[in-house]
Image (spheres, coloured by chain):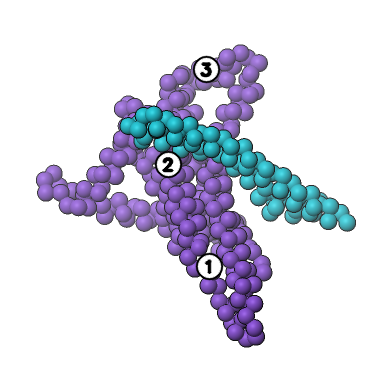
Chain colours: A purple, B cyan
């Protein structure tokens, strides 16, 4: 009985130095699917007699606009595409484990990249509102003694965002793997009680792994994916709105 | 002998790191209980309370996730690293 929990498998190395991993391939496939979906949803839009497809597209755009509006206020309307893209990418990445692909969000590189992009946007917003001097002076508040702690808490933002998303998806993956292994083992033990060849044959067919992991998948794949995408976008909007207020 | 000690340390450390799961469990349970109270008092604010609670839960979960990541590092990365040093 061996349980294997691995990171993203490396398919081949480009030019001998750039490893092409499953994360990279699945991410690109998801990006292509999302782009195709957007093109398909927004084809021949009309003002009157809207088709069902256009109604769905309008609903999605309105939902994204409402989300950003309630969290950030109306003057941040230009962040709607970014937040919506982040949400779609996150949900599709996490759900890709349903069809047996390696989910890109179970790789720290993906989530850390997103978190760094968000961190750069937060810093840019801060510098834009308060100027470079104001941004640097912000670290010495409320008293200059606290400067190192302020720097640490600033650096902790992208790290905690990245680890939160990564940890949730990976913990789901690890627990699903362990449950599958445990059920296979339980199956062998249970049907192994039957005498002779019958027990061996029935024991090698994993009956117990049918059905039971589906309930786990409901939580770890569906709920967790949407939840983490929602949290990531929520934190992005809140941090940027906060940075603009100072 | 050194190998055994290193592996033992990593395994015990991973087990200890996952004790961090207690904190978020208590904290999230408390938050959900308070949210239930709030919804019982004002059923019309259910949507707002639920989304705020979920956000708070996700943030409270961070420390548990740190513990989990530390456990993963101790199980999968640290043994190779420390055995390489010997």
Q: Mark 3 falls within which chain? A: A
Residue beneath label 1, please? A209
Q: Position of residue B25 (x, y in %)?
A: 58, 40
Residue A81 % position (x, y): 34, 40
Residue at 36%, 56% in the rendered image: A33
Which residue is label 2 attached to? A230
Badge 2 and badge 3 in a common chain: yes
Q: Is residue A175 left or right of residue A93?
A: right
Distance from the alpha carbon under mark 1 to that under mark 3: 60 Å
Depicted A62 relative to depicted A91: above or below: above
Residue A50 visible within the image: yes
Q: Tell me the distance, in whole angstroms, between the alpha carbons under discs 2 and 3.
A: 34 Å
Local secondary structure at mark 2 = helix
Position in image of residue A220 (x %, y %): 50, 52
How dense is the environment of label 3, judged by Cα within 10 Å: few (below 14), some, or many (20 and up)?
few
B53 or B33, which lies in front? B33
Q: Quadrant of the N terminus of chain B?
A: bottom right
User: Quadrant location of residue B44?
Assistant: top left
Q: Is residue B81 left or right of residue A230?
A: right
Query: Which of the labelled discs sits on residue B2, or is there none?
Result: none
Mark 2 burial class by Cα count in 10 Å: few <14, some 14-19, many 20+: many
- Name which residue lies at 18% across and 48% down: A45
Q: Circles 2 and 1: CB distance less than 8 Å?
A: no
At numbered mark 1, what does the secondary structure look like: helix, strand or loop? loop
- Residue B28 or residue A242, whichever sits in front: B28
- Name the residue that disc number 3 marks: A133
């Amino acid at each position: 009985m061996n349980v294997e929990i691995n990171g993203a498998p490396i398919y081949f190395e480009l030019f001998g130095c750039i490893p092409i991993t499953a994360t990279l391939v699945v991410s690109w496939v998801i990006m292509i699917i999302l782009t195709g979906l957007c093109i398909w949803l927004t084809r021949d839009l009309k003002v009157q007699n809207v088709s069902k497809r256009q109604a769905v597209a309008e609903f999605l755009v309105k939902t994204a606009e409402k989300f950003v509006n309630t969290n950030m206020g109306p003057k941040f309307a230009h962040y709607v595409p970014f937040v919506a893209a982040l949400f779609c990418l996150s949900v599709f990445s996490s759900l890709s484990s349903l069809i047996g692909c390696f989910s890109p969000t179970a790789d720290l590189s993906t989530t850390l990249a997103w978190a760094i992009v968000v961190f750069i946007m937060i810093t840019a917003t801060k510098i834009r509102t308060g100027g470079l001097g104001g941004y640097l002076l912000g670290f010495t508040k409320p008293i200059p003694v606290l400067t190192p702690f302020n720097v640490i808490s600033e650096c902790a933002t992208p790290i905690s965002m990245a680890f939160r998303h990564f940890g949730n998806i990976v913990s789901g993956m690890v627990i699903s793997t362990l449950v599958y292994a445990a059920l296979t083992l339980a199956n062998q033990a249970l049907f192994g009680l039957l005498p002779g060849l019958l027990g061996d044959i029935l024991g090698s067919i994993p009956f117990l792994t049918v059905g039971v992991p589906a309930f786990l998948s409901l939580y770890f794949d569906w709920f967790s994916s949407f939840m983490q995408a929602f949290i990531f976008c929520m934190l992005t909007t809140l941090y940027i709105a906060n940075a603009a207020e100072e | 002998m050194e190998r055994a000690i290193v592996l033992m340390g990593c395994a015990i450390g991973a087990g200890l790191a996952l004790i961090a799961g207690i904190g978020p469990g208590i904290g999230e349970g408390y938050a959900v209980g308070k949210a239930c109270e709030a919804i019982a008092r004002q059923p019309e604010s259910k949507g707002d309370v639920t989304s705020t609670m979920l956000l708070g839960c996700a943030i409270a979960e961070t420390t548990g996730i740190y513990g989990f990541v530390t456990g993963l590092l101790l199980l999968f990365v640290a043994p190779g690293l420390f055995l390489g040093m010997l």
